[in-house]
Amino acid sequence: MKKLFKSIAIVAVLLMSSGVFAQAKKVESINSNDKSLLWEISGNGLSKSSYLYGTIHMICGNDYLLSDKTKKAFTASDNLVLEVNLSDPKELSVAQQLAYGKEPLSKTLSPEQLNDLDALLQKRTGMTVKQVDKFSLMTVISLITMKSFGCVDIKSYEMEFIAMAKESDKSVTGFETLQAQMDFLSKGYSDAEMITMLQESNDDTTKKMVQNYIQENLPELYKDITAPKVMNEKARKWLLDVRNENWVVKMPDMMKDKSTFFAVGAAHLLDEQGVINLLRKKGYIVKPILN
């Protein structure tokens, strides 16, 4: 059980950074015909093109795919940048520590919240809240979300990219630390809001999201993972807008002299405060790679 929840702690990182907890009013900064997960960044003094890739973070092994254009862009890149560098042993150690709550859930949640969580757990995993009492709420939510994919063989695009980077001796860095991500999460959501969000989700939502990802339909994928019922404006500010702005400040130096492959949750790419639009405002040419 301990080993299982340590692994799920890493999944929690991926879920938080994926934009699963992200909402936007409109998709204004992308043409509906620009259906691509992969974007080229050029101009504004860059000697080489860099690339921006939107991930879904988790997917069943049978659904996992990496297009030839993405492999080509990755091969052409000199280094890899993720939201969090999960190849760093220190970050993995933090992930394992965060799997456990500072206090048992039975002390941090209200009786009503415990009942709601227990009902969700029994319905979707067959477990009870007593079995997960010492783990963090984010870890428990990650366990339930994993079950919604309906498979045992779960793959992570981030971990796959890390493996590819190691094989080709590319450096791997992250925009932020895991602790910073968890701090953003705590600013964006209360425990009650996270439980309510989970109650609103279902397996059909996950299936639809995966199908849009396979089809590289970024506009529809964005709508899937940023449904208004998922988040309020406070959470949007801390989980998307602030982080996107922080990343775009760092990106120029990261790609100034090298071709960089940036892989972040698909929800971070679009909308007025999305990474694509923010880079364009800085003078970069950002265009979809369609084939």
Image (spheres, rainbow, N blue to C red):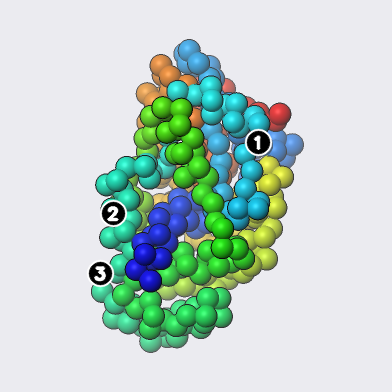
Confirm or deny contact between disc 2 and disc 3 (CB under 8 A): no
Provide the residue designation for mark 3: 102
- Could you tell me which secondary element the residue under label 3 belongs to? loop
Location of residue 262 in the rendering, given as x and y in whole percent from the top left corner? 48, 33
Name the image quarter holding the N terminus: bottom left
Q: Give the Cα separation between the discs numbered 1 and 2.
A: 32 Å
Q: CA distance from mark 3 to mark 1?
A: 42 Å
- Residue 179 location in percent, x, y? 30, 52
Residue placed under numbered mark 1 in the picture = 67
Q: Is residue 64 left or right of residue 48?
A: right
Instruction: Answer with the quarter of the image where residue 8 lies.
Output: bottom left
Q: Residue at x 36, y 64 (%)?
A: 3
Residue at coordinates 49% horizontally, 38% vertically from top-left?
Answer: 161
Rendered residue at 65%/48% (across/down): 213
Seen at 50% across and 42% down, the residue is 160
Using a 10 Å C-alpha cutoff, classify the residue at mark 3 as few (fewer than 14 neighbours), some (14 to 19) or many (20 or more).
few
Residue type marked 2: Val
**10 Å crowding of disc 2: few (<14), some (14-19), many (20+):** some
Vertical order, 160 against 111 (above or below): above
Q: Amino acid at mark 1?
A: Ser
Query: Circles 1 and 2: CB distance less than 8 Å?
Result: no
Q: Position of residue 27 (x, y in %)?
A: 63, 45
